[in-house]
Image: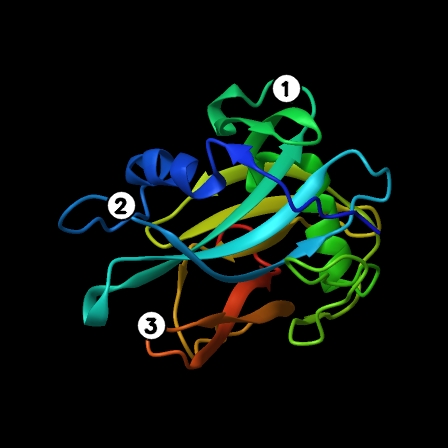
Amino acid sequence: MAVIHHTTMQPTKLELLAEWLPGRPWYTGGAGGPSPAKTGGFRLDDPAGEVGIEFMAVTDGAGPDAVTYLVPMTYRGAPLEGAEHALIGTSEHGVLGTRWIYDGVHDPVLVERLHALLAGRAEAQAQSVDNTTDPTVAASLTPSGAEAELVRVTEGADHTDVVVREADAAEPLTLRVRRVLRDGEDGGQGRGRVTAEWRLADGTTARGAFTVALADAGR
């Protein structure tokens, strides 16, 4: 399992996201500019031990106008070839040195691990604790499906569709990553989903779909 280094990052992930979020088609904005705060999420392990994978829920704004966004991120020790458009930024890690941080929906390693989570071949890990699974994350996929590879990514008004090709399937599968998180929303019908928790401003816990697996890639 991946080791979480409790050290400094300059700039921090939240500082990078404050610059990056306004350019996203699903960012709704607000008075005073973005001020994202981490309010939940989980990690996945890369079996090769090379890529850090995090699904971070960040809440922007306050009160009834606050919006929680889901930002899957990958952390790499070198640039990902062909993914310049998906680069959130670079940061100096206190232990690992320069890290290239990507919007993870464009990273083949994160996409494969997300599919593995849905199919029961991977376990969600606690966001800030070493070697600890996160039992609050629920995932399912029916049928479970073999390994999958990234085909294409398209953006929606409140989601990102990641189309994958499963090794044992004739038709592609769409992993709809919910970019705007809503408490109690299960994402509708599909082959499966990942649901997880995040914190609301009043300290209570919200839960909803992070990803929904859709058999119809054109949906």
What percent of the width, then of the height, locates residue 192? Answer: 64, 69
- Indicate the colouring scheme: rainbow
Res. 187 in view: no
Q: Is residue 152 left or right of residue 122?
A: left
The residue that disc 2 covers is 34
Residue 79 image label: 1
- The residue at the far left in this view is 31
Q: Which mark is residue 201?
A: 3
Q: Earlier in the sequence, mark 3 or mark 1?
A: 1
Name which residue type carries label 1: Pro
Task: Give me the residue at 57% from left, 37% from top.
Answer: 8
- Judge from the rendering whether residue 187 lies leftward or rightward of residue 67; answer left or right: right
- Nearest the viewer among 178 and 30 is 30
The percent position of residue 40, horizontal first and vertical second, equals 51, 63
**What's the residue at 53%, 63% (across, down)?**
210
Crowding near pointer 2: few (<14 within 10 Å), some, many (20+)?
Answer: many
Place residue 116 in its image quadrant.
bottom right
